[in-house]
Amino acid sequence: MPDHKAESILIALTSHGQLGDTGRATGAYLPEIAHPWSVFKAAGYSVDLASVEGGDPPLDGVDLDDPIQRQFTEDSQMSQKLATTMTPKDVHPNDYAAIFFAGGHGSMWDFPDNAEFARIAIDIYERGGVIGAVCHGPAALVNMTLPNGRPLVAGKKISAFTNEEERLMGLTEVVPFLLQSRLEQAGAEHIGTAAFKEWVVVDERIVTGQNPASATGVAESVVAELAQH
């Protein structure tokens, strides 16, 4: 069992910056990076950042009137890590107690089929670590399989951006698939709440949240799960 107190947490980010063929930009949702970082840091963990393509990922949801986002962007270490994110190939899973998949609509395009992030996450999980994901971040989970070939989410209670929330955003026909439906197809028991309300689900060291409002709660639950294992 890993010594969680001596370890770091990896936040995984999308590198996809285009919202389908709408001509609109998307990317990794900064509040879902900064707020979890603040929780992890307060709990004594160091945080590293990796993105699908590495380097400087596209960002969405940036609001520097949010003091936590401002604190994150003004932290010299984290701003440097964000500008030079690792690629998944740079990551050594043994270094991490948990992996946290931040959302942003971009993750719907490049998380599901990223075999490297899947390998890292399963490695961490199989060693007794925690997988966290929020909003569209659970797109990383839809094709993940355990060493026995079983889908990671099969039979697990999972929360993610709901079909209703996607409809209310007017993006049902833009995203490559509906995340709630795809998770259910993989055998997950999707559990949600009212649109855009905070909602966190924990099941066997998998911690998921429904939407941006859930980011802090997911991070707090990741820390709580690490404390128990």
Image (cartoon, rainbow, N blue to C red):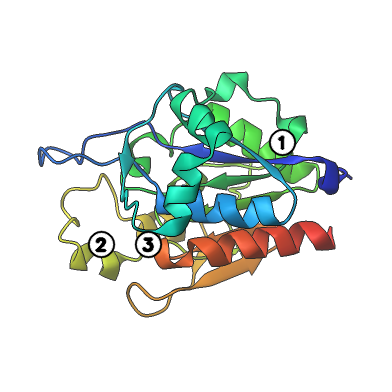
Location of residue 116 by image quarter: top right
**Quadrant including the N terminus:** top right
How far is the residue under mark 3 from the one under mark 1? 25 Å
Q: Which mark is residue 166?
A: 2
Q: Position of residue 3 (x, y in %)?
A: 88, 44
**Amino acid type, label 1:** Asp
Relative depth, front residue between 195 and 34: 34
Q: Is residue 212 visible?
A: yes
Residue 126 sits in quarter: top right
Mark closer to the chain start, 3 or 2? 3
Q: Label 2 sits on what residue type?
A: Glu
Residue at the spot of label 3: 161
Label 3–label 2 contact, CB within 8 A: yes
Quadrant location, the C terminus: bottom right
Residue 202 falls in image quadrant:
bottom right
**Coordinates of residue 97 in the picture (x, y in percent):** 75, 44
Residue 51, given in percent of the width and then of the height, sits at 47, 30
Q: Could you tell me how far apart the alpha carbons at marks 3 and 2 are, in whole angstroms? A: 7 Å
Q: Which residue is mark 1?
A: 123
Q: Earlier in the sequence, mark 1 or mark 2?
A: 1
What SS does tag 2 mark? helix
Q: Residue at point 44% right, 21% down?
A: 55
Residue 14 lies, in percent from the top left, at 40, 36
Q: Residue at x 33, y 39 (%)?
A: 59
Can residue 211 be seen in this snapshot? no
